[in-house]
Amino acid sequence: PQQVAQPLARAAGPGGHHRPAPGLRHGHGMLGIGGEDVLPRGPRLGEEPAGPAAGLDALGLLHPGKGRKPEQRPIGQHRIPAAPGEVEGPRRRRPVVAAWTRGSRERLGNLLRENGVAAEPVDDIGQIGGLGQGVVALAVLGLERGFVAPATATGAKFGLSVVGEQDLLGERIARPPRRRKRADQFIADATGIEQGDLVVHQDHGIGRYDGLSTIEVNGAPHDCLRLLYDGGDKLFLPVENIEVLSRFGTETAGIALDKLGGTSWQSRKAKAKQRIQDMAGQLIRIAAERQVKEGMLATPPEGAWDEFCARFPFAETEDQQRAIADVIEDLASGRPMDRL
């Protein structure tokens, strides 16, 4: 938000002279911060820091604190301080955690509160000043690295100690965009048909593809697929109507061709439709029985689950993302899972 970004821009350096630095984005331009105020890149949650990071002690989010020795922690525990007194920074600096989106701000807030740190979302600099002592401000800012700034730079009665989302959770993992399934898959199947292959016409049944022919209709040439049927009958299908055609399959031994104008194909279609209707009715009854049954209800804890997801070192495929979402939804539904 602009209300937060403007005072952070003033805090970036004296006199309005800023060196470009990636991370603090505002509108279409870039805001910079002095190199001496940039916090070193922090460790992931649950890892010991490689060395002291100037400014991070102001929040106490990445360092255990002075006079304490790093302790061993089980998996799932991290170094967010349990004592609210650790949060308030020195020289009246107010702690701010910068998230990339409102959704990530909510997840970071849950993570902090689960570890005994009071945190509240803010949309402007005035709200930061109105927070109580020991309360972390949660802002939506595109920061890759945190920084510290004195009160003289912010234009307020307090300074800022800003920690970025990546300082807490580590490097952001790029997720591949969801891709739409191609609606023209049938064209790819059709282009794979070779001469002599069996094909199925939705109105005339099983025939054999015999190549392409060009015929004239009303004086205009038309490209057509030549299909052979029982008795030597031929059907010329215009290429623009190829959607009514599909490949028969891989097992073609012993398969008889249908006869154009015959009743065998229509009879088989009617029987298949009836079997499909019977199967659908059975599936509906089974689904209705499952709906009234109660299953295990399980929902992942927000803080630990968000931390686990953020630390996953790989980019999921589209199918993996969908499978994960489906499983979580099923576990939280309180009904038996109904998937293959």
Image: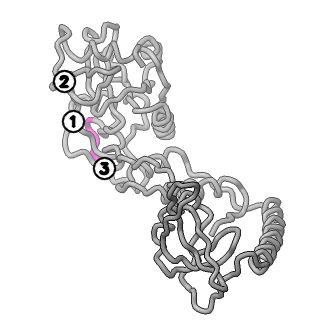
Percent position of residue 59, x then y: 34, 29
Q: Secondary structure at mark 3?
A: loop
Q: Which residues are magenta?
A: 66-70
Label 3 or label 1, whichever lies nearer to me, is 1
Label 2 or label 3, whichever lies nearer to me, is 2
Percent position of residue 130, x then y: 47, 13
Describe residue 327's horizontal placement relative to residue 306 as left or right.
right
For label 3, the residue is 47
Describe residue 190's horizontal placement relative to residue 299 as left or right.
left
Reply yes or no: does residue 144 show up in magenta. no
Describe residue 88's horizontal placement relative to residue 230 as left or right.
left
For label 2, the residue is 20
Disc with the residue nearer the chain's start (2 vs 1): 2
State the separation of the CA atoms marked 2 and 1: 17 Å
Percent position of residue 35, x then y: 16, 26
> Can you tell which mark lies on residue 264?
none
Q: Secondary structure at mark 2?
A: loop
